[in-house]
Image: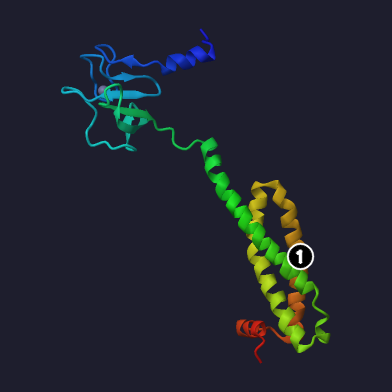
Amino acid sequence: MIQPFHSAAKAAGRLRPSGPRNLCPVCGRNADGDCRFSENLILCHQGTRFGPPQHLRPGDVIDINGVRWALIRSDSGFDGAAHEFRPDRGITSKQETNVAAPQRRVRQLATSRRLRQFNLGFREALRCPAFELLSADEADRYLPAIFNTADQGLKLEPVVASLASHDPSWKRHLKALRHRLKAIGYQRDNARWVFGIPTPEDIAALGRGDE
Ligand SMILES: [Zn+2]
């Protein structure tokens, strides 16, 4: 017979007392009805003859006939003398999504900020006149922008690609980033060709305007 959902849920939630033919799954109590349990809850009463294992602390998990049950607290039940066990359901995929969502949001915000920085650097690099026409001041200003921004973009690309793989709305950011990376990559390679390949010290010196 197929039960309506609500009555099935009710049946699953109904607590049955321990008894001679209904042993408490935790302590085996059969003498009286002091322990009560359902498919979702076990209230195991601490008595003199029967009682839950005393070494258990809230959060501990025990195995009952192949099912994992977690001790929620040890002062449950009407008289505060029962161990309350609930099935250890682990983290369901729904909970996992809920837990991960704020972290993903933080990562998106941080990545958005880095993308904005990259885009600012990219626009600055684009303003650079033809290398052959650069004054020393302009070289000090634009060359670090080109090298640093190209570096920044290379580090950013896998992060944005990972976000785009989870969230289609990031695909256009990834596309734009790759396009700009290509452009600034050409600019960087040309700068290397015109000025020679700079060492990290050269780049740092350019940033400080040292001679
Ligand atoms: Zn019990």
Residue that protrudes farthest toward the left in the picture = 48
Name the residue: 46% across, 15% down: 10
Image x and y of residue 177, in percent: 73, 61
Q: From the image, which quarter does the C terminus lie in?
A: bottom right
Residue 126 sits in quarter: bottom right
Residue 211 vs 179, above or below: the answer is below
Ligand 1 quadrant in view: top left
Image check: 46 left or right of 135? left
Q: Which residue bears the numbered disc 1? A: 180
Image x and y of residue 13, in percent: 42, 18
Name the residue: 71% across, 86% down: 196
Residue that protrudes farthest toward the top in the picture = 1
Report the number of discs: 1
Image x and y of residue 59, in percent: 34, 38
Residue 52 vs 110, above or below: the answer is above
Residue 181 sits in quarter: bottom right
Q: Nearer the viewer, residue 95 or 175?
A: 95
Residue that protrudes farthest toward the front in the picture = 79
Name the residue: 74% across, 77% down: 189
Residue 40 vs 164, above or below: the answer is above
Tell me if the residue at label 1 has its CB under 8 Å from ligand 1.
Answer: no
Q: Nearer the viewer, residue 11 or 136?
A: 136
Image check: 100 left or right of 112? left
Residue type, mark 1 in image = Arg
